[in-house]
Image (tube, coloured by chain):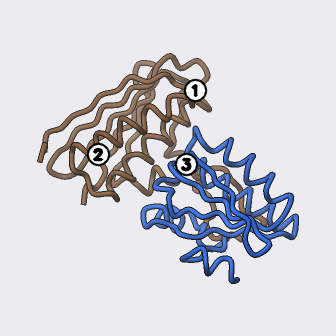
Chain colours: A brown, B blue
Amino acid sequence: MAGSMELSLRLRPEAEAVPVLLDRLEAYAWEAGLPPAAAQRLALVCEEWLANVAMHGAGASFAELALWREADGLHLRLADDGPAFDPLAEPPPDTECPLGERMAGGLGLHLMRRMTRRLDYAREAGRNRLLAVLDVA
Amino acid sequence: MEIVEIEAEGMTVAVLEGRLDTATAPAAEARLLALLAERPVVADLSAVRYVSSAGLRVLLKAAKQGTASGHGFSICGLQSPVREVFEISGFDRIITAYPTRAEALAA
């Protein structure tokens, strides 16, 4: 059903835009008939991206998302014009350490990496661009 | 996000409903930490359909506060997508989770 469904969103690069983003993605997931696990992965990748742009992207004037479906999964293109930031270059959090030593940082990027089958970063023409492929099944 | 508080067995059950995300995390954190100052807290997440890293940070702070205050903090009723996020993040090893509220209260 609706195999070619596309979505594109232009968002304010701030935390207050996260509920708007998640509402739109929930509606998309429902209309596209995505399984709950795929809908969750999609929402997580997009929220963590936007939250990062909002937190680190002082000076970003926009955050843009394009989403489309191909035979191999959901394709996402995420772009913002904040300072250069490669999420793939950040060290992963230590998910093995005990509560007392567990730090709160790095979790969002960890989830982005784990929820995508492919995630590529490029800095092009003053923009951060992420291309992601997510499993649908 | 809605949070309903129920007193039971000398603990507070905080029943969360909705998404625990970037937008809802600050209020949820303030509420849980305030409750933890009084008595042990069980966060019932059976009506939470989504938790992002912002939500995980709230639960991490609550768990640390629960340890520091000696009151204790646990969660119950994780939906399977939320449990997946917990496991990927290693939170299943650092936050005590029970299948049901009854089991959390009996512990």
Which of the 4 image quarters holds residue B63?
Answer: bottom right
Q: Position of residue A31 (x, y in %)?
A: 22, 43
Q: Position of residue A136 (x, y in %)?
A: 25, 55
Tag 1 residue = A57
Residue drawn 53% across the image and 69% down it: B77
- Which of the two discs, 2 and 1, sits closer to the camera? 2
Tag 2 residue = A29
- Front residue (pair A119, A53): A53
Residue drawn 70% across the image and 83% down it: B107
Label 2 near label 3: C-beta < 8 Å?
no
Is A132 positioned to the left or the right of A56 in the image? Answer: left
The span from disc 2 to disc 1 (Cα, nearest Å) is 28 Å
Chain under callout 1? A
Q: Are marks 3 and 2 on the same chain?
A: yes
Q: Which mark is residue A1?
A: none
Is B37 positioned to the left or the right of B84 in the image? Answer: right
Amino acid of disc 1:
Gly
Is A95 positioned to the left or the right of B69 in the image? Answer: left
Residue at disc 3, secondary structure: helix
Tag 3 residue = A108
The span from disc 3 to disc 2 (Cα, nearest Å) is 21 Å
Chain under callout 3? A
